[in-house]
Image (cartoon, grey):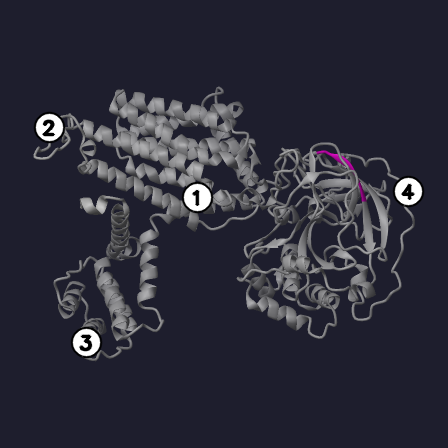
Amino acid sequence: MSGRARLAVCALVATLSAACALLPLVEPVGWMFQAALLLGLVTTVGALARRVPLARPLTIAAQALTGLVLLTLMFTRGQAVAGLLPGPDAFHEFGQLLQEGAGDVGRYAIPAPVTTGIRLLLVGGVLVIGLIVDALAVTYRSAAPAGLPLLALYSVAAGLSKGGAGWLWFLVAAAGYLLLLLAEGRDRLSRWGRVFGGGPTTAGRPYSTGSTSFAAAGGPAPAPVRTGRRIGALALGIALVVPAVLPTLGGGLLDMSARGRAGADGGTISAVNPLVSLQNSLNQPEDQEVLNYRTTTPDTRDLYLRIVALDQFDGAAWKPSQRTVVDVPDRLPDPPGLAPDVDTTAVNTSVSTAKWYAQNWLPMPYPASRVDIPGRWRFEPEGRTLVGDRGQNTRGVRYQVESLIVRPTARQLAEAPPPRRALRREYTRVPDSLPPVVQRTAQQVTRGARSAYGKAVRLQDWFALNGGFTYNTEVRAGSGTQAIARFLKQKEGFCVHFSFSMAAMARTLGIPARVAVGFTPGGKRADGSYSVGLKDAHAWPELYFEGIGWTRFEPTPSRGSVPDYTISADAPDEDDPGRAEPLPGRTAAPRSEPSADGGTCPPDQRRVAECGALPSQSGGGPADGGPAPGTVAAGALVALLVLLLPAVPLLWRIRARARRLGAARPRGPAAGVLGPWRELVDSGWDYGIVPDDALTPRQAAARIVRAGELTGPAAEAARRVAGSVEQALYAPRPQAAPGLADDVRRIRAGLRDAASWRQRLRAVVAPRSAVRLLWTARARASATLDRLRMAVPGRSAAR
């Protein structure tokens, strides 16, 4: 096998090795075999083009065209010209699939199902990375830079996986890259002819010129081998550091918190993130029906269809905790904290979901007592939710739910005893990053309230009535600590902002709180059933009171219904606001066809048969509703990977400058002078004035003034800094020299003004002095290796 052929095979193996880190993200893994087949064909085309030989750019173009045709055959064959060549329709279909894939990335939790869009992202991404690696390592014979696209591919998997991609996948990816470096080194050496090394040495006998390598002789390795080792070590170090500094991404495929741990049968849970499309659903111009139901209660104001409870607040987002899921019992456990003296009414509800509505959490009234549903479903006891197992979702399902409508009185809530210590500790936890304004505002709003219940109602009324808040679904969504502080200042948002903020503020007051996501009861139809649409998507806070359990509050203005037990908090009334009559048995399942259309359908034509059929797509929104959150997150991640490595020198210089010129009090006069002096020397270096250690500080400053064409205040500042350095180093009693940081900034401004635009750009984007970072890393690595060598038994005596 020729050197280039060996390189091409190693480049293929390296790409597939790095792509293996993506395997845990999706199920099943058949896409990997498709990617390997397509990449093998593209690699073969490149090998043939190089044997012709074609020019390097033409070789890459031939490979890219081959990859595009193969992707067309696999994904858009029906829209291709003659079923083979990509045309405008095929490119349009590619765009649609990419958009759907980006939406699925944000929709599903790990491991996600391999939808057509996700498969295109995976196969197409591996194909593009493989083409880049082949072009760098084989066509241009430079294997070391090929580690960057491999690193980007591995880092995507590590960034999406909670806790990284795992040590096994890291070793696989690293082994592939090292194999590529080894093949490139052998190919480079082979072009010089046969390589001779030294034979083994014995006492009184010099090295021979046989075929034994230097490594076998115990001597130093050849320079190319040492270079390859250093490159490999540096690449592995970067691969470890980059995933560690990637920002945490939450939700959907970017968040494993939605996964329940394996139950008794070892099943895994893959659940749709309930918050990803909530804002999009509320902003849809057409209110498509999600589900319809019939219920035995005549008053549906409190019949919220709850999907999931978000009980973990880590500072970046509210999300469900990882908890054990079990088989759905015939009768669900009693609701936690509910005392027998609280008035409850049993309700039977029959639900039918739309055929396009596919997500893995089951909407149902809270608290449910019994659920009758076909398919593979699991039960999470703490949140009392049902989650689809192994691809099970809500698409076109019919099910029956027995639930309770809990009607506590205001007095019962006001006189509720303190919650259990363990529950209070878990559900009042707030992150250290929560701005103090959140707790301070909560204390101001609830000042004078006599009980936890009174504080909760004060918070609800402040948000919904007298706090000056405005409901607006166009406001940028956010659930982190800064988003809450921003919302309290701007006082404009939608249900996510209101519920998250009230729950966080309640926790700061010591009230256990979490956030529920689901649907409001919807609207009643002429046939007696109820229709729930996209615009009924909602989020609300649930607060815990001992003896009542998790209790709904409604802080969002103009949305949902305010519970009766929150109307008179300061003067609780023991009289029940309205007891429901005993309920009959289950009713027949509701009609499956949607009938409420809202917005675009006239009031007299609200039936689906008269307004037209619903679209059959699996998502809820139109294509022109703006970029999906998954698309934005994926684009931001790719941009981060592209910009991270080139930005390392820039970020290091910014950090070094801030440390040297910072306002922290230095330890001694010399330390307060040497930091600004180092920054002055490096600033001159960034603008092309290479430092000379043989010069005195005064001579070095004069050289910077002369070469940097400094005049006026900037030149005087350079001389002052140099004089302060000499005084700090050589004076018997050094004195502090204030104002040096301002002098250095003045000098930097003078250097920038005298430089050309290319020099200014180079000084900012790729500063020359950033090489100190590499020198420091190399020195530390050498020192570590020396210590390790000395620690080996017998090595010290040999030396």
At label 2, counting other C-alpha atoms closer than 10 Å, the crowd grade (few under 14, some 14-19, many 20 or more) is few
The three-letter code of the residue at mark 3 reads Gln
Q: Are marks 3 and 1 in contact (CB under 8 Å)?
A: no
What is the distance, in whole Å, between disc 3 and disc 1 at their CAs? 51 Å
Q: Is residue 116 above or below residue 539?
A: above
What is the distance, in whole Å, between disc 2 and disc 3 at their CAs? 60 Å
What is the distance, in whole Å, between disc 4 and disc 1 at their CAs? 57 Å
Which residue is label 4 attached to?
Answer: 584
The three-letter code of the residue at mark 2 reads Thr
Residue drawn at (80%, 35%), measured in percent from left and top? 591
The disc label shown at residue 638, or none: 1
The three-letter code of the residue at mark 4 reads Pro
Q: Give residue 401's position: percent from left, percent from top.
A: 79, 41
Q: Is residue 125 visible?
A: no
Which residue is label 2 attached to?
Answer: 209
At label 3, counting other C-alpha atoms closer than 10 Å, the crowd grade (few under 14, some 14-19, many 20 or more) is some
Q: Give residue 88's position: percent from left, percent from top.
A: 48, 30
Q: Give residue 379's position: percent from left, percent from top.
A: 70, 41
- Upstream in sequence: badge 1 or badge 2: 2
What is the distance, in whole Å, between disc 2 and disc 4 at their CAs? 99 Å
In reply to whether residue 553 is colored magenta, the answer given is: no
Instruction: Say left or right for 451 vs 269.
Output: right
- Upstream in sequence: badge 2 or badge 3: 2
- Upstream in sequence: badge 4 or badge 1: 4
* Tag nearer the camera, 4 or 3: 3
The three-letter code of the residue at mark 1 reads Val
